[in-house]
Image (cartoon, rainbow, N blue to C red):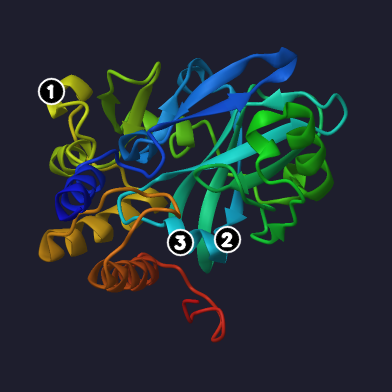
Amino acid sequence: MMRIILFLSAILLSGCATIGGNTMAVANDGGTKTEVSLDPISFIGIKETEAIRSGQFSAVLGNFPDALFAEMHPLRMRYNAIAFGKTTGKEYPAQALYAGYAECALRLVFIVEGNPDEPVVGVFADTRMTRLWSLYGDEITLEIPEKLTSDSVYRRDVVRAGGTEISRLKKVATDGKSGLSQVFAGWNTVRTKALPYDIRTPLAEKFVRGIARENPELSFSEKLVGNGHFGVTLSWFSTAMGVASDVLVSAGASDKGWDEQSELKRGYQGMIARIVKAQYEGAVRNGMLCGKKASIPY
């Protein structure tokens, strides 16, 4: 019996980056399904789709939901997002990027692709898409959470009923010298064998290497093609990721998954708190001015 226990423990300790496998099936309109990666390396930056490359997207500034602290990782940039047209009910590709402290609060930049010519309603979602939040950061009650991925009609109805119309939020510039398109163009390209898209990230090569090692199924050389310059572009993102990198260098920490079901050591929890504090202080040093109450990180 002891041998069996030790054998099972070894499997669990050396297994996939997230509990339950590295992919998840999401139902699309028309009954088809898309395999979505849960590998940590797929969350280190923006998905470089054709719409992102061509600048065909819109962006607004939302609030980082308190409950997503359970899935926060110092080197995680991308979080799941969902968008539907308010009039047609069409689902638009969407993603969210962690911006650290901006406008006196922790923020996610909500990005919807395609420049829709109709009002769009959006939400933030957890890694496995079992929980949703409005773009203000308020949780949306779900009667059947598992249907979010298995039933596109249910997902549409829930998002349109409880989501946030993006026109209500502050826009983030997408073009011009300081727009997101220019920011993404200055980031590094990471190419993974398991994904149908490249990833743009401000992370330095050594941190990408560390994340790549978390998945034992693919080596770093298979995951990364060194066609980026590995520099950090000045922006909200550079402040957030720069201080995260500084703390990680001193802590030498690593983990095995970024979803809520993954295990986390107490020391790592403390490190994340240090990083959030450092991101706040970095934003203040870079000119973020807030009222007395708003200046205290939550």
Does label 1 or label 2 sit earlier along the sequence?
2
Upstream in the sequence, badge 3 or badge 1? Answer: 3
Residue that mark 3 sits on: 70
Above or below for 163 versus 91: below
- Which element type, helix, strand or loop, lies under badge 2? loop
How far apart, in angstroms, are the residues tagged by discs 2 and 3?
A: 10 Å
Query: Which residue in the protein does label 1 denote?
Result: 221
Q: Which quadrant of the structure image shows residue 137?
A: bottom right
Q: Mark 1 and mark 2: span between their CA atoms?
A: 35 Å
Going by the numbered disc 3, the residue's amino acid type is Ala
Pick the residue in front: 19 or 195.
Answer: 19
What label does residue 87 carry, if any? none
Q: Are marks 2 and 3 in contact (CB under 8 Å)?
A: no
Q: For mark 2, what is the residue?
A: 65
**Mark 1: secondary structure:** helix
Extreme residue in the front direction = 1
Gap in angstroms between the C-alphas marked 3 and 1: 30 Å
Side of 175 where 190 appears, left or right? left
- Give the foreground label among 2 and 3: 3
Q: Position of residue 32 (x, y in %)?
A: 64, 14
